[in-house]
Image (tube, rainbow, N blue to C red):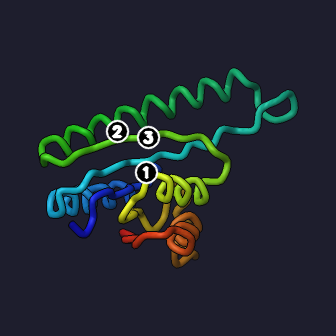
Amino acid sequence: MLFQNILVPYDGSKFANRAFKIALNLGKKYSAKITILTVLNTPMTGSWYVDNRIADADLKRQLKIIQGQFKKFGESAKKSNVKFNSKIIYPQNVGKAIVSYAKSSKMDLVVMGSHGKTNWDKLILGSVANGVSNRVHCPVLIVK
């Protein structure tokens, strides 16, 4: 098999949703397992940054949204008879976290959106996608 483990970094953007659909098709074709990974940046907290209660409430809201989306992705994978796993991690550097996870989990392919939530039109490729594609050990499919 060419691809056994496919990683899909997910940030809620339309590009990430497209990346999942493509990864799902690849998963069917190669009988591969798909892992969807969300990297949540926790805000700086403390008396002069953000009130901890606000940060905690925002994090809980984000988790609820992400878990709901992961459930939908899991149902789609099950219908397509594709093995599926989801993971949420909390480091400060998103790109490095994706690269590290891909390496430690022995991923064969990363399928990710070209731009994330920031979606700056002036950038040819999003900074996270660019960083991952330059540092990861396996092939990267960048989806527009």
Depth check, front residue: 67 or 95? 95
- The answer to which of marks 2 and 3 sits earlier in the sequence is 2
Q: What kind of element bears circle 1?
A: loop
- Identify the residue position indicated by label 2 in the image: 69
- Identify the residue position indicated by label 1 in the image: 10
Tell me which residue sits at (44%, 47%) in the image: 37
Q: How many residues crowd mark 1 within 10 Å: few (<14), some (14–19), many (20+)?
A: many
Please, what is the three-letter code of the amino acid marked with disc 2?
Gln
Q: Where residue 137 appears, x then y in whole percent?
A: 49, 70
- The answer to which of marks 2 and 1 sits earlier in the sequence is 1
Tell me which residue sits at (47%, 57%) in the image: 102
41 over 45 or under it: above or below: below
Depth check, front residue: 82 or 122? 82
Q: What kind of element bears circle 2?
A: helix
Q: Which of labels 2 and 3 is toward the front? A: 3
- Identify the residue position indicated by label 3 in the image: 87
Tell me which residue sits at (67%, 48%) in the image: 92
89 vs 27, left or right, is: right
- Is residue 126 visible to us here? no
Gap between marks 2 and 1 measured at Cα = 10 Å
The picture quadrant where one finds residue 143 is bottom left
Q: Where residue 97 appears, x then y in whole percent?
A: 58, 53
Gap between marks 2 and 3 measured at Cα = 12 Å
Please, what is the three-letter code of the amino acid marked with disc 1?
Tyr
51 over 106 or under it: above or below: above
52 vs 109, left or right, is: right
Tell me which residue sits at (18%, 48%) in the image: 82
Whether tag 2 and tag 1 are in contact, CB under 8 A, the answer is yes
Q: Where residue 99 appears, x then y in whole percent?
A: 54, 60
23 vs 86, left or right, is: left
